[in-house]
Amino acid sequence: MGYQSAYRAHWQRFGHRDIQEIRVSELKRYLASTPLKRKTRRHVVSVLRLIYEEAVADGIFATNPLANWNMRKDRETEHYQADPYTAAERDTLLDWLKHNCPIAWRYFLHGFYSGMRTGELLGFPWKNYQPPHAIIDQEMVRREIRHYQKTQRIREVLTPEPLVAMMEDNPTRKTGGLVHQTPTGLMFKDADWLMKWWRRAHHATGVRRRTGPYPWRATFVSQCISGGVPIEDVARWIGNSPEMIRVHYHKYLRDDERERRLLATMEDAVREP
């Protein structure tokens, strides 16, 4: 009913037109002109994406034109400021979780030390763990496992020592299947139960809770960048572009790296045509 309501309120006005004639830019302009809360906006765009997925299934499009549409408003994306945890805050949260809910501890440690998104963590299988590497080729989406179909979306990441140690002691390793499982040994179809423990950890420790979509991901990126890991490698691990990292994590670059890139940009600007 929620999907039907969202369609009628926002997309039915486009329903009389051939879907091939509708430009994505037109849909974005409409949504940008409509004041919506972030959660409602995500819901509305999800409905639209489902419509286009049906068009793909019917052979109208080879791929979903909305596959790479960020659900946040463009201006929110442009002005997004990464708000990562410090290493001390991360360790405080993980220590509390380890002593109070080992299942949640393993999940969030995995996120902090890999930069993986929620769906990728929920859908990560043991067969893809090949230390010191891990293959990310599927995720939990709308309570179902979805395998990545595009080769460029499949990526290989490195697993640092704290993550390797957690994996070796993880009891789900004996059963196989997914790495992160519920207390009864089932798959997590969403992260609601885990996020309750996430909130409890903040309340118990007094650590300020970050509001970004994947704060453990932002923490991983910022720590890698400030530690001198090349941007291109970090981008490859997390599945984003180097340009995105430069825009949103520029302040975490080491001073010498920041100056070198600034000098290169300045030289390009003043070079004779």
Image (cartoon, helix red, strand yellow):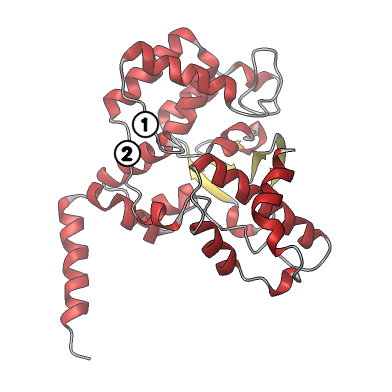
Q: Residues within 10 Å of mark 2 (few under 14, many from 20)?
A: some
Query: Which residue lies most toward the right here?
Result: 58
Amino acid under disc 1? Arg
The location of residue 74, given as percent across then percent down, is 44, 57
Residue tagged 1: 210
Secondary element at tag 2: loop
Residue depicted at 20% across the width and 78% down the height: 269
Work out whether residue 251 or residue 264 is closer to the camera in this orientation and state it.
251
Q: CA distance from mark 2 to mark 1?
A: 7 Å
Q: Position of 114 compared to 53: left or right?
A: left
The location of residue 109, given as percent across then percent down, is 45, 26
Amino acid under disc 2? Asp
Residue depicted at 35% across the width and 37% down the height: 219
Choose top left, top right, bottom left or bottom right for residue 28: bottom right
Q: Position of 87 compared to 33: left or right?
A: left
Q: Looking at the image, do the residues carrying marks 2 and 1 touch, with CB atoms under 8 Å apart?
A: yes
Q: Is residue 230 visible?
A: no
50 is higher (above) or lower (below) than 203: below
Choose top left, top right, bottom left or bottom right for residue 84: top left
258 is higher (above) or lower (below) than 219: below
125 is higher (above) or lower (below) than 50: above
Secondary element at tag 1: loop
The location of residue 5, given as percent across then percent down, is 70, 44
Residue depicted at 61% across the width and 43% down the height: 43
Work out whether residue 119 or residue 105 is closer to the camera in this orientation and state it.
119
Q: Is residue 170 visible?
A: yes
Choose top left, top right, bottom left or bottom right for residue 221: top left
Residue depicted at 50% across the width and 39% down the height: 116
Residue tagged 2: 83
10 is higher (above) or lower (below) than 99: below
